[in-house]
Amino acid sequence: MKKIIPIIIAIAAIIFVSCNGNTSPGESQEKVNKKDSMPIQKNNDTATDVKTVPVSFTNIDPAVTVYMKEMVQNYLDVKNALIDNNGSGAASASNKIAAAMKNFDKSLLSAEQKKVYDDIEDDIKEHAEHIGKNGDKVGHQREHFSMMSEAMYTLVKAFGAGITLYHDHCPMFNDNKGAMWLSEIKNIRNPYYGEEMMTCGSVMEVFK
């Protein structure tokens, strides 16, 4: 009997260590389920690990710089309205983009600058007009915002924005084809889903 007792104690010790070193099947499955249910995201709070994009043109007329700042600010107003699911706000800001473009004097651009601007001018106008006319259709506005964002990216890359901007990417919008946007803040606030998936996305580049 005395020989059996140490054996029993040893077996009990092994069972105790084993149970405390592993997660129960139910707990493991719960963690897996939670992970699978989360949206794909990489919310960079500092954006220190992303590429800084240089501006193409540095010899820009001061009046052009003012115009670009106005364009970017109106674009950001559209973006922020869509974050809040505010269709009328997005429409109002988009109408300001269209109005600013009508009054812009392209003679202020060099031949090279004008070529870049002409390539995206019609795209920005078209998408701004669609967003401006559909204040009651936020989903439709977001579709055109994704395309307008690509044109605005080209504009900012060429002429600058006058402020630091972050190029963000949402992998889930448009049936998981993804979509980009520009933001004035480091933290992800998704204009394509709003509160539904506010932090879904990642910072890709930064303009300074």
Image: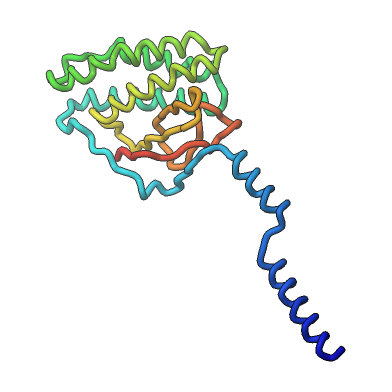
Q: Is residue 6 left or right of residue 110?
A: right
Whole-percent x, y for residue 88 in the image: 54, 16
Residue 81 in view here: no
- At x 49%, y 16%, the residue is 141
Quadrant in which the N terminus appears? bottom right
> In this figure, which colouring scheme has been used for the structure?
rainbow
Q: Quadrant of residue 159?
A: top left
Residue 109 lies, in percent from the top left, at: 17, 20
Q: 49 or 33: nearer the eye? A: 33
Instruction: Look at the image and tell me whether residue 10 can be seen.
Output: yes
Above or below — where is 26 with respect to 146?
A: below
Q: Is residue 174 left or right of residue 28?
A: left
Q: Quadrant of the C terminus?
A: top left
Q: Is 140 drawn above or below residue 202 in the view shown? A: above
Image x and y of residue 190, in percent: 50, 32
In this orientation, which residue lies closer to the viewer: 174 or 197? 174
Above or below residue 183? Residue 110 is above
Please report the residue visible at 36 percent of the width from the left and 50 percent of the height from the top: 48
Q: Nearer the viewer, residue 83 or 197?
A: 197
Q: As displayed, is residue 183 above or below residue 4? A: above
Q: x, y (%) of residue 16?
A: 74, 72
Left or right for 63, reference 201: left
Q: Residue at 28% of width from left, 26% of height from top?
A: 154
